[in-house]
Image: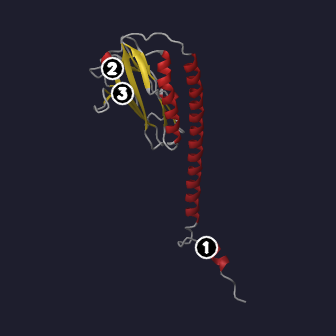
Amino acid sequence: MGRREHLAAFVPSLVTMAFSLLAAVDGMEITVPSLIYALNGTDIRLPCSFNSCYKVDNKQFSMNWTYRSCSNCSEETFIQFDKKIINQRLERFQNRVEFSGNPIKNDLSVMIRDVQLQDGGEYHCYVLNPPDRHKGTGKIRLEVLTEVPPERDSTVAVLVGASVGGFLAIVILFLVILKCVRRKKQQNLNSEDQKTEEDVKTDGEGNPEGELKASIPEAP
């Protein structure tokens, strides 16, 4: 598969990702490539980043990477974050997998050293950043190649990919801003409602005593 085919396959995934984000404004946004090619015996980075309205608190933040060799196979956790990075060191990966991201910078990427043919499959990046209540999920399909694909003219594909990538970046930024604004408004409304409830409890019947007296006309 040539570079043009790589980009041609990647461009539709960018469009799909953009519309999926539009449909899930209330959830956490996870950004991952849907498909990655790696040459057998080389090192490959699996990127995963997230957007949240809240700062990362190590005491509440959680993350885990899982692997499964086929869509119907069970998932195996190989890296997770529980107050610190924990490498499960699965036998299939031995010591070839390491965490290369930084949760404080919203980067949850991992590195696979000396990629093997059996490393091909699905990789899932899960993240939860309270007070966000929705867990974010990203899925990457890794294809391991035995030889470098031939070089081909990919000028058009590069231009299309760059244009769609720029559009996707704008969409993600817009969604993050929109979600944060909505959450702040909801928090303000909840605070105002709570304050109102406390104010109207002064007479035990839901009305302040002063208002009750003012509503009773004086006898002539």
x, y (%) of residue 115? 36, 15
Tell which circle, 1 or 3, labels the residue nearer the N-terminal end.
3
Residue 188 drawn above or below residue 92 = below
Quarter of the image for residue 58 reads: top left
Residue wearing tag 3: 122
Q: Nearer the viewer, residue 96 or 187?
A: 96
Residue 57 drawn above or below residue 121 = below
Quarter of the image for residue 137 reads: top left
Q: Secondary structure at mark 3?
A: strand
CB-based contact (under 8 Å), mark 3 and mark 2: no
Label 1 sits on what residue type? Answer: Glu
Label 3 sits on what residue type? Answer: Glu
Residue wearing tag 1: 209
Q: Residue furthest bottom?
A: 220
Q: Secondary structure at mark 2?
A: helix
Residue density around tag 2, few if under 14, some if 14–19, many if 20 or more, within 10 Å: many
x, y (%) of residue 200? 57, 67
Of circles 1 and 3, the one toward us is 3
Tell which circle, 1 or 2, labels the residue nearer the N-terminal end.
2
Q: Nearer the viewer, residue 95 or 104?
A: 95
x, y (%) of residue 85? 39, 26
Residue density around tag 3, few if under 14, some if 14–19, many if 20 or more, within 10 Å: many
Label 2 sits on what residue type? Answer: Asp
Horizontal relation, residue 101 to residue 199: left or right: left
Asked whether residue 81 is in view, the answer is: no
